[in-house]
């Protein structure tokens, strides 16, 4: 069965036959496009595309589905490589605390923050947690996300970490987009345990169980002031790697924690947050294949300094953008809003932000061979916009939903006109 997308104002993010794993430096501000275009999909795969001047037609129209782009722009779907989308309840009371002047650390000391979410999650059974979480996954797909990473980390004991990871596994089985699972047992230290006791539990109990049950692709650690040190992070990641889990790291959100250095040393696929990043650390990242992943929604929501994105790009680094969708520090999975914040607050150019949210986000999940560009042989996870002037309008129109249709695996997942 073939599908044709027609009446496309512009196809953005097209690549011919070359292999592109990610874009860095000046290349981040380059993106190829085709005006007045068409795309042919067979089953779930892009098999051809071009301008109407070189339209080739199809042999059997009876076996062809037509999707009308209605003069919208077609882009690769967003690849959101950092979320905590599986959680119980909400934390709007902490939102009020922040407005009233309490810091992130002060809220945590009062039993808020990660420990608050851990308590709520422990009180929520697996089916209810799954039903809450699947609503969020459906929501972000309709907002244009075609690949997603989800972390555990609100369990903070073996029973509840495994519960979270089983929910992520169920979401993988339920939804048609690629979902990557990350074990983040080292998110905080639970009440009633020393850090040494908890690290021992992570290494000797949690990681073997996660591995035995094949519940995670990655292992992550919150390497930052007040959480886990660089030395502790390395110890935990080393244990994870022995069980086949690829490292990712929460690094340098609150301070210069050494998370970037240990991430590069351990061959982490990505180091995420990076609000505190020096020129020396930028040089360290340049000598690696680790993707710096920036989360401007978190800096915005918490009132933190933003990562030095311009310095990173101008030094030749790649960057990815992700939402950090979670109940405490970024309760939004809207990648278009993330892109707007990246442009407004970190001075990314729109094309840079789009590349960071597509091909570079795909790389940060190990999906660059399947997603992130419009290329023959890649999966047809695509977004069709409404009639907008140009791709620059996406970050410009902050908070506006410009999506007409979402295509997942070559089929319409969401149509704004019919709301399905």
Image: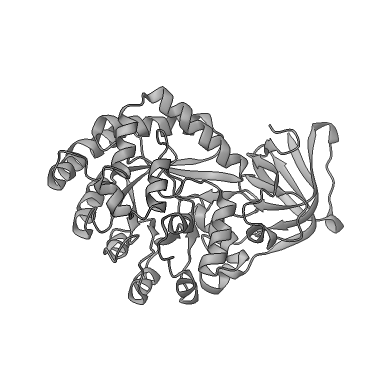
- Where residue 363 appears, as percent x and y from the top left, is 48, 55
- Where residue 91 appears, as percent x and y from the top left, is 40, 40
Q: Is residue 196 left or right of residue 137?
A: left
The number of numbered discs placed on residues in the rendered structure image is 0
- From the viewer's side, name the closer residue of 262 and 335: 335
Quadrant of residue 84 within the rendered picture: top left
Q: Is residue 220 left or right of residue 196?
A: right
Quadrant occupied by the C terminus: top right
Q: Please report the residue visible at 57 percent of the width from the left and 70 percent of the height from the top.
A: 27
Q: Is residue 310 left or right of residue 226?
A: right
Q: Please report the residue visible at 57 percent of the width from the left and 45 percent of the height from the top.
A: 145
Let me know if residue 11 appears in the view: yes
Above or below, 319 against 104 in this view is below
Let me know if residue 19 appears in the view: no
Quadrant occupied by the N terminus: top right
- From the viewer's side, name the closer residue of 94 and 265: 94
- Where residue 289 appears, as percent x and y from the top left, is 40, 63
Q: Please report the residue visible at 51 percent of the width from the left and 67 percent of the height from the top.
A: 346
Question: Residue reaching furthest front?
Answer: 100
* Colour scheme of the rendered structure: one colour
Above or below, 397 against 131 in this view is below
- From the viewer's side, name the closer residue of 212 and 343: 343
- Where residue 97 appears, as percent x and y from the top left, is 37, 48
Q: Please report the residue visible at 42 percent of the width from the left and 52 percent of the height from the top.
A: 99
């Amino acid at each position: 069965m073939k599908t044709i997308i027609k009446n496309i104002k512009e196809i953005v993010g097209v690549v011919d036959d070359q292999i592109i794993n990610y874009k860095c430096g000046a290349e981040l501000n380059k993106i190829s496009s085709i005006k007045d275009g068409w795309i042919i999909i067979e089953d779930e795969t892009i098999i051809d595309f071009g301008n109407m001047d070189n339209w080739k037609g199809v042999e059997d129209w009876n076996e062809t589905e037509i999707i009308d782009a209605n003069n919208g722009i077609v882009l690769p779907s967003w690849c959101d490589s950092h979320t905590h989308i599986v959680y119980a309840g909400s934390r709007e009371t902490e939102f009020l605390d922040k407005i009233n002047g309490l810091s992130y650390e002060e809220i945590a000391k009062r039993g808020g923050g990660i420990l608050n979410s851990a308590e709520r999650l422990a009180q929520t059974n697996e089916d209810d947690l799954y039903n809450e979480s699947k609503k969020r996954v459906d929501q972000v797909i309709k907002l244009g996300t075609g690949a997603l990473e989800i972390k555990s980390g609100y369990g903070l004991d073996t029973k509840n970490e495994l519960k979270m990871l089983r929910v992520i596994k169920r979401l993988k089985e339920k939804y048609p987009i690629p979902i990557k699972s990350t074990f983040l047992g080292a998110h905080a230290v639970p009440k009633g345990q020393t850090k040494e006791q908890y690290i021992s539990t992570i290494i000797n109990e949690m990681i073997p169980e996660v591995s035995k049950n094949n519940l995670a692709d990655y292992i992550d650690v919150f390497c930052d002031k007040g959480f886990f040190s660089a030395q502790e992070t390395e110890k935990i990641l080393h244990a994870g790697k022995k069980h086949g889990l690829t490292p990712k790291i929460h690094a340098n959100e609150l301070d210069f924690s050494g998370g970037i250095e240990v991430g590069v040393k351990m061959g982490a696929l990505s180091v995420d947050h990076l609000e505190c990043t020096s020129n020396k650390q930028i040089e360290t990242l340049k000598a690696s294949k680790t993707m710096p992943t920036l989360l401007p929604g978190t800096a915005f929501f918490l009132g933190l300094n933003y990562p030095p994105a311009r310095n990173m790009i101008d030094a030749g680094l790649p960057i990815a953008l992700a939402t950090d969708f979670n109940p405490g520090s970024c309760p939004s999975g809207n990648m278009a809003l993330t892109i707007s914040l990246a442009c407004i607050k970190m001075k990314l150019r729109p094309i840079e932000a789009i590349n960071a949210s597509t091909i570079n986000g795909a790389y940060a999940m190990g999906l660059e061979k399947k997603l992130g560009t419009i290329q023959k042989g890649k999966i047809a996870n695509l977004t069709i916009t409404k009639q907008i002037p140009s791709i620059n309008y996406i970050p410009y129109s902050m908070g506006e939903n410009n999506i007409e249709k979402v295509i997942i695996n070559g089929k319409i997942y969401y149509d704004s006109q019919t709301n399905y």
